[in-house]
Amino acid sequence: MKMFVVFVILLHVSQHALAVVVEVNEGERSVLLPCQYSGLPPVDPTVTWTRNDLNPNSVHVRQEETDDLRGQNQHYSGRTSMRPDALDSGDFSLTLRNLQLIDSGKYTCTLSNEINKVRVGDVQLQVKDQQVVVKVEEGSESIILPCKTTPDLPEDTTVEWTRSDRELMMIHVYPNRSDHLKNQDDLYCGRTKMNKDLLRTGDLSLTLKYPTERDSGGYICTIYRDEDILRQKVVLQVKEQFPSWAKAVLVLLVLLVLLVVSGGLLFHFRHYFMSGYKVEVDSEVESVQLPCKTTVCLPKDAKVEWKDMKDRKVHVYVDDSDTYTCTVYSLQQKILMKKDVLLTVRGDKVEVDSGMESVQLPCKTTVFLPKDAKVEWKDMNKRKVHVYQNSSDQPKKQNQDYRVHKVEVGSGMESVQLPCKTSVQLSKDINVEWKDKYGKDLSLPAL
C-alpha cells in the first residue's frame, strides 16, 4: 500500500511540477479551477481545496458525497461548489463564483483519508481589474476586439470568444472546425474571423464585421493553453447613427402628423422619409436601369430583392409602367433598406385617318432572335391581333375580328357568301357597307 501511495505521489508531482494558471476578470460570474485525478481513490476519501496564504486556509471540502464547509474561510461562503459525482468521476474541479480581486492566489487540491494524503494539483488564479473598452459607430465595416497573450502557443491551443452579458452565446472558436461553427450563434454567422498566424504571434483578436447596436456588450476571450485557462474581457460599445431618443421623437411626430394633416400632406410626408426614384424610358429602349443605392454597410451574404407593386419578384421582367421596390435584407431577414422606383414607359403614338387602307405599328429590337421565335401583337383588350411563328404568319391564331377571310368559288356559280361577323352589339340604325379592293361600293345595284 505504501509503494502504491509513493507511486501516486511521484506521478502527480511529475504532472503538476508547475501550477495551472487561470486568468479571469473581476466581476465575472464564475470560474472553474481545474483538478483531474486519474488514480484509484483511497477508502473514505476527502477532497480539500486550500489557499495557504489565508487563515483559515480551507476553501472547500468534499467528504464522501457531501460538502463539509464548517471550517471554510468566510470569504468564500456561498461562492464555491463541486460536481455531485466528483469522487466517482475523478473530476475534483472547483467552481468559484462572483470573482473579486482578493480571490487571486494559489489554490491547492488535495485527496486524503485517515492514513494518506495526496497533493493532486495547484492552480494559480489571477483576478484582473482591467477590461478593454472598444467604441465604434454603427455602420462601420468592422471592429477589432483585442486579445493578446504570449507568442508561440502550442498547436493544441483552443480559443473561445463568448458573450459575457447574456446566457452563454458562442461567438467564435479556434481551431475553426465545422463542428465548432455549428455552435456559433446565428447573430454572428459569417461576421467573425481571427488572424491565421495567431499561434505564432499570440494575437487572438477577433474581427467583427458590420457592428450594430445589438452587438454592444461584454465579450470574453478564453484561451486553453495546455492546462492553463486564460481569460480577457472586452466591452464593445456601438453608437447608433440614429439614437433611440431620436427614434422616439420621430414616432411622436408621425403620430401627430397622422392626426392633423390631410391625405395629400401625409403622402408628401411619407414620400419624404421613404425616398424613391422616378424613371421614364422610351418603349423601344433595349434596357433600363432602376437605381437603388444605400450608405449602409452590407455583408457579403446580404439578400437583395426587387419586387413590383404587386409584390411579384422581378428577375427578367418586361411589363408596362409600374412601381418597383428594392429591399435589402441582412442574413437574419432584417430590412436594412427599402426604396420604391416608379417606372413609366412611354409608348409610341401612331395617328392615322379612318379611311386609310393600312397602318404600320412599329416594333423593333436589337436582340438576336432564333428561327422559332414567336411574335404576338395584342390590342388593349388582350385580343390577339397578329401571330408570327416558325417564319410565317399564323392567321388561325388571330382573334376573328382581325382575320382576313379567303373564299374560293368556281366560275359560273349563282352566288357566294362573303363572311363578316362581329361580337359587338349593333344598334337598329346601323349602316353596313361592302366595298371591293378598288373601293367600289358593292351594296348598290350595278349600273
Image: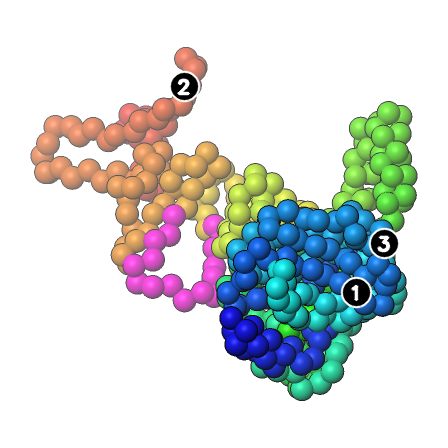
Residue 63 or residue 377, whichever sits in front: 63
Image spot of residue 240 (x, y percent): 84, 54
Quarter residue 184 falls in: bottom right
In the image, which is nearer the foreground, mark 2 or mark 1?
1
Region in magenta: 361-376
Is 369 in the magenta?
yes
Mark-to-mark CA distance, 2 and 3: 102 Å
Height in image: 418 above or below 199? above
Circles 2 and 3, Cβ within 8 Å, touching? The answer is no
Image spot of residue 35 (x, y percent): 63, 65
Quickly name the residue at label 2: 425
Mark-to-mark CA distance, 1 and 3: 12 Å
Secondary structure character of the magenta stretch overall: loop
Task: Residue at 31%, 27% (x, y): give it.
Answer: 421
Quickly name the residue at label 3: 75
34 sits left or right of 350 in the view: right
Is 124 in the magenta?
no
Image spot of residue 415 (x, y percent): 15, 28
Quickly name the residue at label 1: 51
Task: Residue at 30%, 53% (x, y): give it.
Answer: 389
Residue 266 or residue 445, whichever sits in front: 266
Comes first in the chain, label 2 or label 1: 1
Residue 422 visible here: yes
Task: Residue at 89%, 35% (x, y): give it.
Answer: 253
Helix, strand or loop status at disc 1: loop
